[in-house]
Amino acid sequence: MKIENPNPIQWRFSERAQQLQSSFIREILKITQQPEIISFAGGLPSPATFPVEEMKAAFDKVLSTTGKTALQYGPTDGYMPLRQWIADSLSKDGAKIVPEQVLMVSGSQQALDLLGKVLIDEGSRVLVETPSYLGALQAFSVYRPEFTSVATDDDGLVPASIEPVAQGARLLYSLPNFQNPTGRTLSIARRQELVETCARLGLPLIEDDPYGALSYKGEPLPKMVAMNPDGVIYMGSFSKVLTPGIRLGYVVAPLPLVRRLELAKQAADLHTAQLTQMVVHEVIKDGFLDRHIPTIRELYGNQCQAMLDAMAEHFPAGATWTKPQGGMFIWVTLPKHINAMELLDEAIKHKVAFVPGAPFYANEPEAHTLRLSFVTVPPERIRQGIAILGKLIAARM
Amino acid sequence: MKIENPNPIQWRFSERAQQLQSSFIREILKITQQPEIISFAGGLPSPATFPVEEMKAAFDKVLSTTGKTALQYGPTDGYMPLRQWIADSLSKDGAKIVPEQVLMVSGSQQALDLLGKVLIDEGSRVLVETPSYLGALQAFSVYRPEFTSVATDDDGLVPASIEPVAQGARLLYSLPNFQNPTGRTLSIARRQELVETCARLGLPLIEDDPYGALSYKGEPLPKMVAMNPDGVIYMGSFSKVLTPGIRLGYVVAPLPLVRRLELAKQAADLHTAQLTQMVVHEVIKDGFLDRHIPTIRELYGNQCQAMLDAMAEHFPAGATWTKPQGGMFIWVTLPKHINAMELLDEAIKHKVAFVPGAPFYANEPEAHTLRLSFVTVPPERIRQGIAILGKLIAARM
């Protein structure tokens, strides 16, 4: 039945597709997944934290009691009891978030894509932190914005740097808690100032919060969405507190925006798996996360401390790094003459891997930075890997 | 902590977002889901066909044996054993499809979005059938193409109508088996001619095939992708043969295109749920679909026949309709002076619903057409509903 001598197609891709690039991190991960490599490159949560038994019991219960509904097409905006749970949990601090503001998505990466789709035209100005989350840069890039990087320091994003570049900007993307890649946290005073600045300028502020619950000590800082629910777009995820492989996240936005996002979602994939939403609701509805999250915090906190201790011992003077209060990452700044990409090549030869920092910059990459993750590596291996890395850095000093 | 007197945001949406519209069908479904309404409006498969017990057993097995892997982030292109299964099943007729050509997606609606993203620029010409699947029009519309409708008749799309409008076209979207909305099937001779025409013109041909397995009698017709794997993009789905609520589909494309689609997928939602893919593979790997699909065919075939019989009895002369050999839909053409939207308003008052045909046209809607689905309505209710509808149509003759 095959046809004879077909012309080979000369593929003509859209302009946006011509500039699509694979995530550099995903490429590195392919190289570094061999078991003999001590990899600090991952952004993956530790599988030790996945509540397999609870998930299994919930799948069994949902399929046994409401299987036909769970397996049927569902509403685009999501499973109402789960949206209600999310709205309630975000309203605890006195903010008033209603479930109609919550749109369930297929992992919070999809929220980034939908926000880009709905808010960004070609050439639109988009404000991002310096450095910023790579997945956000990748998602927004598809819509061909002009990125403007705003200043950050050890307290996170510098609100005073917004106004000079806010003219015509479509959004400001921020990751205030234990930022990916730096591990930095935006201080309370800065949060207030940032929310006020954006509200005054009429600038939509995205608060991406995948790691917010993972504070090692004390309670998480107040959320910006609670300070101004009419101007802040909040993104949450079950990937870091439950499991990522089910692809479940959510975006909470003012009603005019969330309705547009819902329409974009309908065109993009109709809706997020109904079964998954019902199962997650079943797992978390009676307070499971309140018991579960402290175990993740303890595991990650211990491994973070092991890495910080090893770095203090083995990294040479001239290298500096962040001291995260939560989350999954430490950010290292080397002397300017050391190129982290070259360091990586050598490190891999010595069976250690990390992620060079340059891809996290929307503009003017700083090639002497790198990101380390400690969450999937046991303390003993952390010490070994950091000792090796310290030697390689020292040799380049 | 709330800030004082924030300015309300004047939302500025992207140009593509300003024209986003909700699916008319989804809007109708909201109205017609009251149990007292006999609804032929649905496009949902019958929950009676969902293999709840098999799914439950598979979730239990996958989580028990490989839970940590199933719940972790997975590769963007998908779960290899499932991609291999799909490639093998498409290669049965002698075509050579390799698993590297298969990209798993979060329901085949996502394949439409990714294809639009990667192939369509603003103003690009896109060829679609007359009428065409509404979800495809909706997905492509986001990328603002110029749609050109190509002619169809009872044998499906007319290949000779392609060449005059192919100049500069980015793709031709077709649904050859039991088309949504018409229930028509593209004849074998037409398939061959269509594949040859597109190959000669260098025009990418999309073969969307959600219903192909649901033939009531005899075997499905040969797939176009098997005739020219280098020029045809095949889209498949587990929604109609297994269950839609898990959101799992796939696209099979020539390698240069599938790599771009994978990059677009990575930016859109990283990957499709790993657990879902592993569970579906577990359910189907030993021939389950060969036993299961015949039961769906029989159920739908009987209900289709019940509807056709009732239409022959109750619909007045002057109305014509398709006689599907499979799938989920019958397409009705009324005399030109009868507006199906007005008919729907009246039908709902009499507790019967259907979908007017106009939204399925990319250009020049034919307002005297409508779509009926029989799959979720028992035969007795089908007869009642068709009798009522027949009377309402007769009254307008």
Image (cartoon, coloured by chain):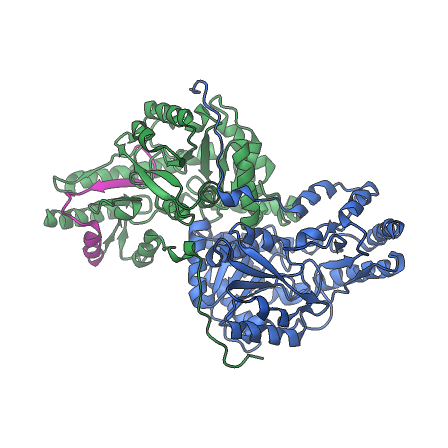
Chain colours: A blue, B green
Nearer the observer, A65 or A120 = A120
Residue A203: horizontal and vertical position, in percent? 52, 68
Look at 30% across and 45% down and name the residue there.
Answer: B360
Nearer the observer, A15 or B332 = A15
Judge whether B101 appears above or below B43 on screen: above
Nearer the observer, B347 or B396 = B396
Q: Quadrant of residue B2?
A: bottom right
Q: Is residue A201 left or right of residue B241?
A: right
Q: Is residue B29 left or right of residue A348?
A: left
Residue placed furthest toward the top: A4
Bounds of the magenta segment: B325-349
Specify whether residue A77 is in view.
no
Judge whether B316 appears above or below A109 on screen: above
Specify whether residue A145 is in view.
yes
Q: Quadrant of residue A290?
A: bottom right
Residue A273: horizontal and vertical position, in percent? 49, 52
Residue A71: horizontal and vertical position, in percent? 46, 49
Q: Is residue A101 left or right of residue A330?
A: left
- The number of discs equals 0
Nearer the observer, A127 or A63 = A127
Q: Quadrant of the N terminus of chain B?
A: bottom right
Q: Is B345 within the magenta? A: yes
Residue B254: horizontal and vertical position, in percent? 51, 31
Q: Is residue B219 left or right of residue B397?
A: right
Look at 63% across and 47% down and name the residue there.
Answer: A23
Q: Is B244 within the magenta? A: no
